[in-house]
Amino acid sequence: MKVFYSDATILSGDSLSDVIDLGEEYNPGIYQILAIQMPPGWTTARLSFSVSADGETFVPLYWNGEPYEIDAGAGAGASRGVSVEPSAFVGWPYVKILSGKHGTPINQAGERSLKVMIGGV
């Protein structure tokens, strides 16, 4: 399995990261997000995801009929590794990470850089 790393940055006072490109640099459908290393100082919030087929129009990611969310840990979410379900990202070439839930985002108190592990065959 090949493994790559990409940083996803959420600016201070914001809740949505910049784009993680699984399309041009990687081959969509072959590479998925495997895990996320949470940054120090993370303002307590769940992780949700927005996805896009074209890199411009983003929609909430649903998996098995439910919004896909990860509990990053209450307070202890800072400086921890969080595994994700790779199959939730199959076929999506562009992903953004949301601090909080869709409809109830939580702004980060400082700039946060999440290290995203991307893998595939």
Image: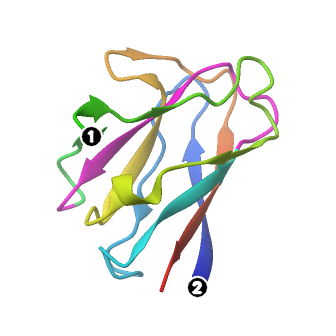
User: Observer-nearest residue: 121 or 5?
Assistant: 121
- Quarter of the picture holding the N terminus: bottom right
Secondary structure under tag 1 reads loop
Q: Quadrant of residue 29?
A: bottom left
Which residue, as the protein is rendered here, is positioned at the far top?
Answer: 104
- Is-magenta flag for residue 42? yes
Residue at position x 78%, y 32% in the image: 78
Tell me, yes or no, whether the two marked residues, 2 and 1, touch with CB atoms within 8 Å.
no
Query: Viewed as shown, does residue 65 lie left or right of 112?
Result: left
Q: Which mark is residue 19?
A: none
Q: Determine the main secondary structure of the stretch shown in magenta.
A: loop
Q: Answer few, some or many: residues within 10 Å of disc 1's Cα (few below 14, many 20 plus, some between 14 and 19).
A: few
Q: Which residue is mark 2?
A: 2
Q: Quadrant of residue 77?
A: top right
Residue at position x 18%, y 60% in the image: 53
Magenta-tinted stretch: 38-54
The residue under label 2 is which amino acid type? Answer: Lys
> Percent from the top left, x then y, of residue 69?
45, 32
> Percent from the top left, x then y, of residue 47?
52, 32
Query: Viewed as shown, does residue 46 lie left or right of 64?
Result: right
Above/below status of 56 relative to 58: below
The residue under label 1 is which amino acid type? Answer: Asn
Above/below status of 65 relative to 25: above
- Is-magenta flag for residue 40? yes
Pointer 2 or 1: first along the chain: 2
Q: Answer few, some or many: residues within 10 Å of disc 2's Cα (few below 14, many 20 plus, some between 14 and 19).
A: few
User: Observer-nearest residue: 62 or 51?
Assistant: 62
Above/below status of 88 relative to 27: above
